Amino acid sequence: MSTTITTWGLSYAEVSVGDEIPPVSLPITHKRVCMNAASTWDWFPGHHEPDYARAQGQRNIYLSTLFYHGFVDRGLNDWAGPDALIRRRKISMIKSIYPGQTATLTGKVVGKREENGRQLVDLELLVSSEEGPCVPSEATVELPDRQA
Amino acid sequence: MSDDVTGLGLKFGTVEEGQAWVGRTSEPKKAWFPIDRSMVLYYCSLVEDGNPRYWDGDECPPGLLMTLGFNPQWTPEHLRRGDGLFALGIPLPGKHIINASTTTELERRPRIGDHVSIDEEIVSISEEKTTRLGTGVFITSVTTYRDQRGDTIGRNTNVLFRYNLQEEPA
């Protein structure tokens, strides 16, 4: 399939160390946690069976790794535009997020470098809930030379 | 009755038996079907991602790569495969699992139509540690995703905590 995509977004020159990405928040409903399992095929019972989640030491069903992948990447591309290529993304899950809470992504640019012809921007990111930090993350994003 | 309360096919043994798996790599397995548009759009709906490369183009969010290693919840007998996630087949004491971290490195953007093959290497298993969830080991594995030409799309380094609650016997 070949489709022409209208692009926009940041170029490497437009980004500075210290820049912050616009925060992104999503309400985490019971439905969204169920969507998490269904849309990712991740049927580990902690993500859809409350009794199992409690038996493993959790408060309720909780968001999965694959949710955080997509949520962090969405925040990065919302900020930098669809041409930004996420070369690396690390997430560390230190606290779960449950139905009834809000997941909020924040982040800032901590470095810029050129490597093997690629223009790379390093970011520190954090997914939080009302209870504080939940998923500290980091990413390296390749940005285009100039604005599309 | 199986001790596997997760339904994911956990195998059980001692920490030493589990650590003998370090260095092993799974046979490559093919995802059940090529990446398709419904998978992509359902996933974008989950995180409300309006990226036009996904909605108007033919690309796939890299966050979905892990999904390609999962099997359907049910299959007809003649199509059944015994190739669940490799790390879950390591014999270890823990009844429970929870993911601790993942690091994804991308060589190129995944696309609709990619029929991905997956292999998984066990790179380390820690000594037993106690966290606020319980006592268990951290399993680090590296999964490589290749397209139908054998070219690498990306790789995922995953750290999984396999544990028992404090009051549970090993």
Image (cartoon, coloured by chain):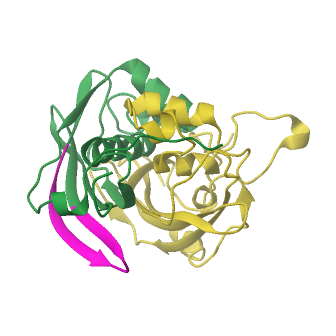
Chain colours: A green, B yellow
Q: Residue at x 52, y 42 (%)?
A: A4
Q: Residue at x 59, y 68 (%)?
A: B152
Q: Residue at x 16, y 58 (%)?
A: A15
Residue B166 lies within the magenta run: no
- Which residue is at the front of the view, B65 or A117? A117
Q: Quadrant of residue A109?
A: bottom left
Q: Residue at x 48, y 51 (%)?
A: B62
Is there any visible trace of residue A49 in the rendered image? no
Is there any visible trace of residue A4 in the rendered image? yes
- State whether the magenta stretch is mostly helix, strand or loop: strand
Q: Is residue A79 above or below residue A18?
A: above
Left of B17 or right of it: where is B157?
left
Left of A8 or right of it: where is B127?
right
Residue extending furthest toward the right: B78
Residue A119 lies within the magenta run: yes
- Which residue is at the front of the view, B53 or B93? B53
Q: Quadrant of residue A115?
A: bottom left
- Which residue is at the front of the view, B90 or A68? A68
Q: Is residue B77 above or below residue B144?
A: above
Horizontal and vertical percent position of residue B88: 59, 55
Left of A123 or right of it: where is A30?
right
Horizontal and vertical percent position of residue B169: 46, 51
Q: Is residue B101 above or below residue A75?
A: below
Region of the chain picked out in magenta, as a range:
A106-122
Horizontal and vertical percent position of residue A92: 31, 55
Horizontal and vertical percent position of residue A77: 32, 45
Quadrant in which the N terminus of chain A is drawn? top right
